[in-house]
Image (cartoon, grey):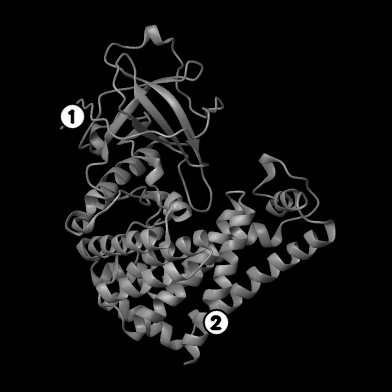
Amino acid sequence: MVAIINPYRASHRALAPLDTGLSYDIASLPYRDWPSTTQCYKIEYIRKSESAWLLFVRPMDTDTKERFVLKILCRYKDTRYNLETVDERQRCQLEALQWNRTFTPDVYIGLARISDWDKHQKKIGIDEIITDPTREMLVRGADYALVMHQLPMDRRLDYLLNKESKASLRHYVQLLTKRLVQIHETLAPLSIEDGSQWGNFEQLQQKLEHNFALADPVVTASKNHRYSTSNWREAPLDCLKDTLLQVLPNAQYHHSSNLLKRTFNLLKAALFQVFTRSQYQEYFMQRVQEQRIKRCHGDLKAPNILIAPCNPSCDRELEKHIWILDAVDFNPMYCNIDLLSDLAMLVIDIQVRTKSSWLADLMIEDYLGLAGQGDVASKSVLAYYLVEKAFVGAAISMAYDNLPGLGWAFLEVAEMRMKDLKRLVEM
């Protein structure tokens, strides 16, 4: 079914000026020459990552205050993403629409072909919005925008963690935990055969080695190059060096650099030692047999979650007050996972952002209780995933996102959770 929709909603927030260095092969026609069927939007702000653009837009030629967000995938490839071809980008956009509607109904509107993009006037034109697209409906060779309602950015969980009181945060996290349990329980489990494909010991070992490799650029980077945007992936430690030397004496920097490498290597060795213990092979297989492997969100973290002001009655309609966005759509290895792996990413992200474990531990306790997963195997598997997610967060923050401060915070949490994991294993 194809339909033109104009559903706008919510407030907007200033983010960053539009970057004119767009990497898209889209003709930039004068606005007056755009086809009459094109829906035209003014680009107000943009957020750019390596793999996608988020365009915050408003409709032109109307007085409405309503806003949209357009997510447009970039031509990009690394060890996590492969978005080099239009076909692959279309596939990811279709999957994103399907799965994000599962986690948060009523926010994602549909897909729309990008017809024109005027970089200088900061305008974009899109074709009719396809509310329920299939691959056959999409034009070959054309890039599509994922169209969604713009939500109030001041309700993002990462903002709330910085400004709300302890009592409010406790309430929000308890509601979020209930919502996550709801979602996990309603997701269709993979068959034992399919679950075994993604959750068996050999597959998990390959994934662990893949995750370890995310830190390789940090651990093995040469010190012979100076920082530039173009050589970040080749020499991330040089980027860290330029950042840290602004606040640290040279001797302290070299100490920090060596400590960084040593911490990553010690965590890799300790986590792999736990992973290969015989009881963990049994725990992972138990999770498969219990059909705890599902197609999950895969990227649960505070910036992807928004929570509206809630009262006691919110418990009955959590999906209308808690919006979980931006599910993984690019790599099945990251989303066909154990439910506790999905939980672990969010727990670690909350702990890093609050610089405290109390809220994270509260979430763990509530989730295991509500989901009926308080057995030894579940607690042990979760303890393992907490360390793995903290390690991955540190590696990606440093090697890909150029956020060394956040990377160090993830490493500190990884070390703390590693101590907990060792105590659990030795009991």
- The image shows residue 78, relative to residue 210, as above or below, that is above
- The image shows residue 103, relative to residue 64, as above or below, that is below
- Looking at the rendered image, the quarter that the N terminus falls into is top left
- The image shows residue 421, relative to residue 385, as above or below, that is below
Q: Tell me the residue at 35%/51% (across/down).
A: 327
Q: Tell me the residue at 57%/49% (across/down).
A: 401
Helix, strand or loop status at disc 1: loop
Q: Which amino acid type is shown beneath numbered disc 2?
A: Gln
Q: Where does residue 211 sit, x and y in percent of width and height?
A: 52, 64
Q: Quadrant of residue 296?
A: bottom left
Q: Residue 243 versus residue 141: which sits nearer the camera?
A: 243
Helix, strand or loop status at disc 2: helix
Q: Tell me the residue at 48%/25% (across/down).
A: 25
Q: Where does residue 177 sit, x and y in percent of width and height?
A: 31, 64
Q: Is residue 407 left or right of residue 53?
A: right
From where the camera sits, is residue 411 visible?
A: yes
Q: Specify the farthest residue to the top.
A: 32
Q: Which amino acid type is shown beneath numbered disc 1?
A: Val
Looking at the rendered structure, which numbered label has been put on residue 273? 2
Q: Residue 246 versus residue 263: which sits nearer the camera?
A: 246
* Cα–Cα span, label 2 and label 1: 54 Å
Q: Quadrant of residue 146?
A: top left
Q: Tell me the residue at 51%/16% (across/down).
A: 120
From where the camera sits, is residue 210 visible?
A: no
Q: Where does residue 94 sit, x and y in percent of width and height?
A: 30, 42
Question: 10 Å neighbourhood of mark 2: few (<14), some, or many (≥20)?
Answer: few
- The image shows residue 237, relative to residue 384, as above or below, that is above
Q: Which residue is mark 1?
A: 2
Q: Which comes before the other along the chain, label 2 or label 1?
A: 1
Q: Residue 132 versus residue 373: which sits nearer the camera?
A: 373
Q: Is residue 417 left or right of residue 332?
A: right
